[in-house]
Amino acid sequence: MVSERYQCKSVCVIGAGPSGLVAAREMRKEGHRVVVLEQNHDVGGQWLYDPNVEGEDPLGRNTTSPTTSTNSHHLKVHSSLYTSLRLTSPREIMGFTDFPFSVKKDRDMRRFPGHRELLLYLQDFCDWFGLRDLIRFNTRVAYVGMLQDHVTGCQDLKWLVKSVQKKTQIVMEEVFDSVVVATGHYSQPRLPSIKGMDSWKRKQMHSHIYRDSKPFRNEVVVVVGTSLSGQDISMELVEVAKAVYLSARSMNKISEGLTKVISKHDTLDLHPQIESLQEDGKVLFVDGSWVIADTIIYCTGYSYTFPFLDTKGIVAIDDDRVGPLYEHTFPPSLAPSLSFIGIPRKIIGFPFFESQAKWIAQLLSGKRTLPSWEEMMQSIKDFYHSRDVAGVPKYQTHDIAEFEYCDKYGDHVGFPHLEEWRKELCLSALRNSETNLETYRDSLDDHDLLQEALQSPHFTQQEQEAQDFPL
């Protein structure tokens, strides 16, 4: 719904990664007063590579349960990037709608570039739209809570934000009309529950702190998980390790591409789930097979966590379901003054974050309005029911994996639907990776789609501006 009245709000955006940057831009464009709090020294969020993992708990266990506790410890390392990581999607589909992820001279010009190229894109985006002046770097958010007792539907809700300047440890307290949480979801390790895990004497770590293969030379390594990081890391380790054993949750869901890789290497073997770990270093699998391992690397994904956020239990995390959230964005009792950008997974991220940011900005200004509390809660209930009926586990609540949802979401704010070429390039890359895991980033068969993309308004409307933009 569209309203006639417009308001200027003070907005605190937490995080200067992709979702936080586009949130800052959209809030300012809508006339709001914006402050972005970023714990690191530069923009990028997850894409700001951090090689120094010394002092980080190998399993990420130095944090409390991801609830509303204000006494939680924080991970020292935010980024989970490893040195060799390359994008898993072609660059053409990843840009924000009005700022294409174009090839730049003297930079990584590959269509699936390394992670640094995406960081440079985000830095370009930040500078092009003049966002740096909005950001306070090296500032960690310690607490976010309601300033007054909450009343559902209260229009005057305000938020107390306590932040800590890293170098001086000075604590600043500020009050905002609105808080946008844009902290990402690839930092807090999600770990399996395995018998003997706590007493196993050898090395265990989550892929969150994996950076390269050097420390594992001549070791026997068990890699748990066959997702993107598990595949990448296994292929990297097999070049230096004595043996690599890849443990899969389901032996029936191994892609053709991964099967090809395994068949090529005598020192890479596939095993089912781990049954238990024994103190002598033995790793026992559910089929009765076993190995003696030096190291176990858990490539088992990440959990949502907001250790700074105190909503008096209104927003909670239950087995990686953040809720209740209307359209994965708004807690109905606190909307629109509290919102989340970047919760959904398995989407083309940047355009979706942009549509979220536009909707939040226009709701805060009064240009648009949300449905009633009752309607939002019913929508959430219906969504949960649909996931249950479809047999989707709770921890995959926010895994979207459908273009139609992204288009429907954009309709809330008049946001353009994903272009067909963007969808097709995404699907083409997925199909190629399924069959050609080792080569899909460089052996491409989508020339016609690529030309359609490069000739689309997404690229051509920015051509002159891109030429003027300093490299």
Image: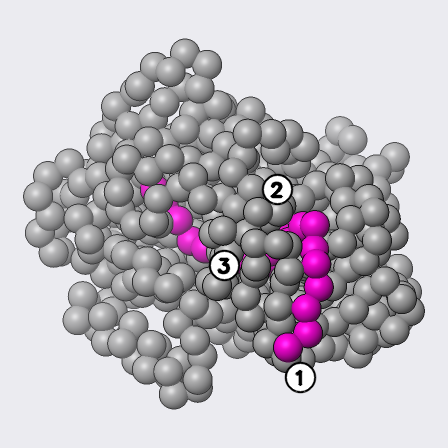
Q: Is residue 446 magenta?
A: no
Which residue corresponds to the image point at 43% horizontal and 39% vertical from the top-left?
62
Query: Looking at the picture, which amino acid does disc 3 mark?
Result: Gly
Dot 3: few (<14), some (14–19), or many (≥20) neighbours within 10 Å? some
SS category of the residue bearing label 3: loop
Mark closer to the chain start, 1 or 3: 3
Which residue matches tag 1? Answer: 252
Q: Is residue 79 above or below residue 235?
A: above
Would residue 332 be visible to someone looking at this image? yes
Q: Based on the displayed image, in which of its 4 quarters is residue 35 positioned?
A: top left
SS category of the residue bearing label 2: helix
SS category of the residue bearing label 1: helix
Range drawn in magenta: 288-307
Numbered circle sitting on residue 196: 3
Mark 1 or 3, closer to the camera:
3
| Cα distance between the residues tagged 1 and 3 | 26 Å
Q: Is residue 371 above or below residue 39?
A: below
Would residue 26 be visible to someone looking at this image? no
Which residue matches tag 2? Answer: 209
Q: Nearer the viewer, residue 276 or 416?
A: 276
301 vs 248, left or right, is: left
Dot 2: few (<14), some (14–19), or many (≥20) neighbours within 10 Å? many
Circle 2/circle 3 CB separation < 8 Å:
no
